[in-house]
Image (spheres, rainbow, N blue to C red):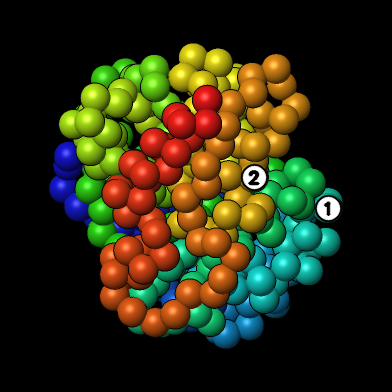
């Protein structure tokens, strides 16, 4: 595993790296040192705008820039990027198909001590149900860099979810790893159960794979970085070849990755029992990030237990 870095920091550095195109404009809601757009602001101050704590206004200004041909990125905490500005994102960005990238930082339980009001556990659900919205949830710094480049190159609205915690880099060392929007990545192979994860739950799933291996269970771990469009082909292949599915996300189990995977299963000929690892339809609360993951059942041991349950249901 590589050096630890948060996905928000990796995004900020990638934005500065790939932001040389004079058509790219970045907007932030007075959080540049948190969302890490500060790197872009320092390098390209003429194309960076601090919009203050006025998120709805920020989205509509960005939409205006995009309507004039710009690539516009709006940045704030995920709870605000998905909730506070839902109306503006839906009606003023995605409905007209404008080239605006919504970047939600500090997502999930691991925003930690900021507590339930700032722990976005519904953002994936909200964003993926908007017609025409692409939703990307990278798991580490290397993948975030590639995801940032990809959404800048892709025309149309995207939602990119990043987090606060420093995480191990697990994708860069994966042989023949390639990032492509809409295509998941198989990180480990196995024929007993498939663990499909996004965000930091990819790292937790790889740890779970080791626990299962010690018990003689061979788990396939899939990094499903794109929630929409979901990689149907990879989900169906995993279901047919392993016969059991576990989905893992730092999000409500309703409406997120687990729901997206189950929608594939029930609309295909690849039936497989599925277990959901995530937040079970409750709010979070304040606490140290990884203690919260343990409290809500998002640890490698929890994933391993879910895998065994899924296998027992074959």
- Confirm whether residue 188 shows in the render: no
Q: Residue at x 59, y 74 (%)?
A: 80
Q: Residue at x 30, y 26 (%)?
A: 217
Count residues near mark 2 (Cα–Cα under 10 Å), then give few for <14, some for 14-19, many for 20+: some
Q: Residue at x 17, y 39 (%)?
A: 1
Q: Quadrant of residue 122?
A: bottom right
- Helix, strand or loop under label 1: loop
Q: Is residue 301 left or right of residue 109?
A: left
User: Which label is found at residue 77?
Assistant: none
Q: Is residue 113 left or right of residue 115?
A: left
Do the numbered discs 2 and 1 sit on residues whose CB atoms are within 8 Å?
no
Question: Is residue 92 depicted above or below 153 in this figure?
Answer: below
Question: Is residue 180 depicted above or below 1 in this figure?
Answer: above
User: Which label is found at residue 259?
Assistant: 2
Q: Which residue is mark 1?
A: 95
CA gap between label 2 and label 1 equals 23 Å
């Amino acid at each position: 595993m590589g050096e630890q870095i948060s996905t928000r920091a990796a995004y900020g550095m990638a934005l500065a790296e790939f932001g040389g195109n004079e058509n790219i404009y970045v907007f932030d809601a007075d959080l540049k040192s948190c969302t890490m757009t500060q790197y872009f602001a320092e390098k390209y101050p003429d194309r960076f705008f601090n919009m203050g704590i006025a998120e709805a206004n920020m989205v509509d200004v960005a939409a205006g820039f995009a309507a004039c041909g710009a690539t516009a990125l709006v940045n704030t905490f995920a709870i605000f990027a998905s909730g506070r500005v839902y109306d503006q994102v839906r009606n003023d960005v995605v409905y007209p198909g404008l080239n605006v990238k919504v970047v939600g930082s500090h997502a999930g339980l691991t925003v930690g001590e900021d507590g339930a009001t700032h722990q976005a556990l519904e953002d994936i659900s909200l964003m993926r149900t908007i017609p025409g919205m692409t939703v990307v949830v990278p798991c580490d710094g290397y993948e975030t860099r590639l995801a940032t480049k990809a959404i800048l190159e892709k025309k149309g609205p995207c939602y990119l979810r990043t987090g606060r915690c420093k995480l191990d880099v697990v994708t860069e060392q994966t042989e023949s790893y390639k990032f492509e929007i809409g295509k998941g990545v198989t990180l480990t192979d196995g024929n007993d159960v498939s663990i499909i994860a996004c965000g930091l739950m990819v790292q937790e799933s790889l740890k779970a794979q080791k626990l299962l291996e010690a018990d003689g269970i061979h788990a396939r771990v899939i990094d499903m970085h794109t929630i929409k469009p979901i990689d149907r082909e990879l989900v169906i292949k995993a279901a047919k070849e392993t016969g059991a599915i576990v989905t893992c996300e730092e999000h409500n189990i309703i409406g997120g990755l687990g729901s997206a995977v189950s929608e594939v299963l029930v609309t295909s000929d690849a039936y497989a029992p599925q277990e959901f690892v995530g937040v079970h339809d409750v709010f979070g609360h304040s606490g140290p990030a990884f203690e919260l993951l343990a409290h809500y059942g998002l640890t490698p041991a929890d994933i391993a237990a879910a895998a065994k349950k899924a296998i027992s249901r074959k």
